[in-house]
Image: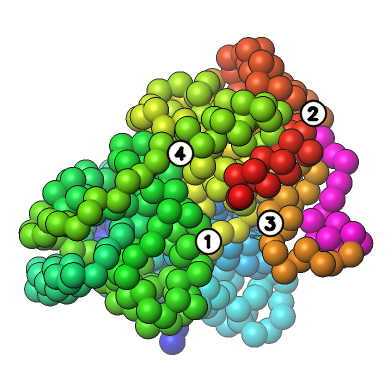
């Protein structure tokens, strides 16, 4: 199926007939307020159009992959569609990782990709690839019936610019109010709510697991939990971990699991795959069960209409800090101890972005349970280690203080993200790099234990790099942290804080914690 690029339904523009301006007007009509630009000759007219509208907020970055993840962060922060604009050719292909992440997180980003006119397609002429439906199932391609539940791809064939293309135009566009709408009919919502109600009506033991949760769902879900008194395991990205008495991963046991929000990162969820006796009911925006065996899934329910109260023995949950504090008091240089320290020094109401893979897991068990009213995010849609810093930077603009915590390889995958730092002008960005010399997560993969050092080091990408010169390249502060007191030297301004945990202590931490 082809893709169209003019939507008279949205803009009946009688002022002029310029495809570049029309594209921008259409994006505004769809609710966009910001534009992220990666430039080339093919999209120059569209860029010109954005800049000549004068009142539009925009950012630019030469690397499309980073820019696309930044766009995802902007959409998450602003809760509205954000547009990313590229030139033609492989530039378009660079958007795929962020497109996939946005698909699994149901984030409404708009990719506007400039293309050569139709007759060039399939000819192999310069910078001409087949861009039609290039993102496959991961992007919607019809603006008229886009439901804002996944990315939208708008492919715009543009001919050679003329000398008139860049003269000032008097076209103006205004940013519309945008309210993210529920993509669900009243009757479906009622039927979903009934399904959850009947799942609850059982004598079997029920536990609730909460993964990444949209900010607007936090209050209704919190109220639902308070009313039902069900035992709960809440991940940090749910925004409820510190507000509830949450079970540890190893304390979860149930006949029925209600999963709310994104797929939980913990082992219990993965083990459910084999544990067929446990019935699972998921409530998640992307409508994906997150598990390959039989389970129920709905996109949304009416939380306030659920009528249920847990009459069984309330499960005792233990203060996770008690267990961990005991261990880290003897192991102050372990990764978990340093994460615990970070969680204490982060100012209240900060953005906290948790990178894959160990940071998100270590935060869950080792961060303070004090409720500092922070907002938590992570790229757990597809669990990629690419684009994490860029997503964080996109989010950071809306926060007075923004802390991102990343593994060393995750950081390496996104080194040019810092191009954005000058544009976002946030003086309180802290990029924490946990340098454990490679992919530490693989030391926790049981099946790899018998492998030789050669195999392990190859899989872990063991290295001896550090990030001091990375900070120097972008002219931002650098702090080396080897023990918790080093955080006292943290200064104002965008900073890279590189942590060097002591390997032996980290190993000992996990050995003690797991036993
Ligand atoms: C784009 C991408 N490539 C590869 C992987 C597989 N992977 C998962 S975790 C990981 C290592 C991460 O290392 P690091 O960022 O240093 O974090 P650590 O495990 O040390 O906490 C890799 C390669 C992935 N998730 N995403
Ligand atoms: Mg690492």
The numbered disc on residue 468 is: 2
Evaluate whether residue 283 shows in this view.
no
* Residue 441 location, quadrant: bottom right
**Extreme residue toward the right, this view:** 454
The answer to which of marks 3 and 4 sits earlier in the sequence is 4
Look at the numbered discs 3 and 1 and tell me whether their residues touch, using CB distance below 8 Å.
Answer: no
Query: Element at badge 3?
Result: helix
First to last magenta residue range: 453-466
The answer to which of marks 3 and 2 sits earlier in the sequence is 3
Q: Which residue is mark 4?
A: 320
Q: Disc 3 to disc 4, how far (Cα)? A: 20 Å
Query: Element at badge 1?
Result: helix
Q: Disc 2 to disc 1, how far (Cα)? A: 35 Å
Q: Horizontally, is 364 left or right of 407 in the view?
A: left
The answer to which of marks 2 and 4 sits earlier in the sequence is 4
Residue at 69% across / 34% down in the picture? 334
* Residue 96 location, quadrant: bottom right
Relative to 431, is 207 above or below?
below
Question: How many neighbours does mark 2 have within 10 angstroms: few (below 14), some (14-19), or many (20 or more)?
Answer: some
Quadrant assignment for ligand 1: bottom right
Look at the numbered discs 3 and 4 and tell me whether their residues touch, using CB distance below 8 Å.
Answer: no
Relative to 41, is 363 above or below?
above
Q: Which residue is mark 1?
A: 267
The answer to which of marks 2 and 1 sits earlier in the sequence is 1
Query: Element at badge 2?
Result: helix
Q: Disc 3 to disc 1, how far (Cα)? A: 11 Å
């Amino acid at each position: 199926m082809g893709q169209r690029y003019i939507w008279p339904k949205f803009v009946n523009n009688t002022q002029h007939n310029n495809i570049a301006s029309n594209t921008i007007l259409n994006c505004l009509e769809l609710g966009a307020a910001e534009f992220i630009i990666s430039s080339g000759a093919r999209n120059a007219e569209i860029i010109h159009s954005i800049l000549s509208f004068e009142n539009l907020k925009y950012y630019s970055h030469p690397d499309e992959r980073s820019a696309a993840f930044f766009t995802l962060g902007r959409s998450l922060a602003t809760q509205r569609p954000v547009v990313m604009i590229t030139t033609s050719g492989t530039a378009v292909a660079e958007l795929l990782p962020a497109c996939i992440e946005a698909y699994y997180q149901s984030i409404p980003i708009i990719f506007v990709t400039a293309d050569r006119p139709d007759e060039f397609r399939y000819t192999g002429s310069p910078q001409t690839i087949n861009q039609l439906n290039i993102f496959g199932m991961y992007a919607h391609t019809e603006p008229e019936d886009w439901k804002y539940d996944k990315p939208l791809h708008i492919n715009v064939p543009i001919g050679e610019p003329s000398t008139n293309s860049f003269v000032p135009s008097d076209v103006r566009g205004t940013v519309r109010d945008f309210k993210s709408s529920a993509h669900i009919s009243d009757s479906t919502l009622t039927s979903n709510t009934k399904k959850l109600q009947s799942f609850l009506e059982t004598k079997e033991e029920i536990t609730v697991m909460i993964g990444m949760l949209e900010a607007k769902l936090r209050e209704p879900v919190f109220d639902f939990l308070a009313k039902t008194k069900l035992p709960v395991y809440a991940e940090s990205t749910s925004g409820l971990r510190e507000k509830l008495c949450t079970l540890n991963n190893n304390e979860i046991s149930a006949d029925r699991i209600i999963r709310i929000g994104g797929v939980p990162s913990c082992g219990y969820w993965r083990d459910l795959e084999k544990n067929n006796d446990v019935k699972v009911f998921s409530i998640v925006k992307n409508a994906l069960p997150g598990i390959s065996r039989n389970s129920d899934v709905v996109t949304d329910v009416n939380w306030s209409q659920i009528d249920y109260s847990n009459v069984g023995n309330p499960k005792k949950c233990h203060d996770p800090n008690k267990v961990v504090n005991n261990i880290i008091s003897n192991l102050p240089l372990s990764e978990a101890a340093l994460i615990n320290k970070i969680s204490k020094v982060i100012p209240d109401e900060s953005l906290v972005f948790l990178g894959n893979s160990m940071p998100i897991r270590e935060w869950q068990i080792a961060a303070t349970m004090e409720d500092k009213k922070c907002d938590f995010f992570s790229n757990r849609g597809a669990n990629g280690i690419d684009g994490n810093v860029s997503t964080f930077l996109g989010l950071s603009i809306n926060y007075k203080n923004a802390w991102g915590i990343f593994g060393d390889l995750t950081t390496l995958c996104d080194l040019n993200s810092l191009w954005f730092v000058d544009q976002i002008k946030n003086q309180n960005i802290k990029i924490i790099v946990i340098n454990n010399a490679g992919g530490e997560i693989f030391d926790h993969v049981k099946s790899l234990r018998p492998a030789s050092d050669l195999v392990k080091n190859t899989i872990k990408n063991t290295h001896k790099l550090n990030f001091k010169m990375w900070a120097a390249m972008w002219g931002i502060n650098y702090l080396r942290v080897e023990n918790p007191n080093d955080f006292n030297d943290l200064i104002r301004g965008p900073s890279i804080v590189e942590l060097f945990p002591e390997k032996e202590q980290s190993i000992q931490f996990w050995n003690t914690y797991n036993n």
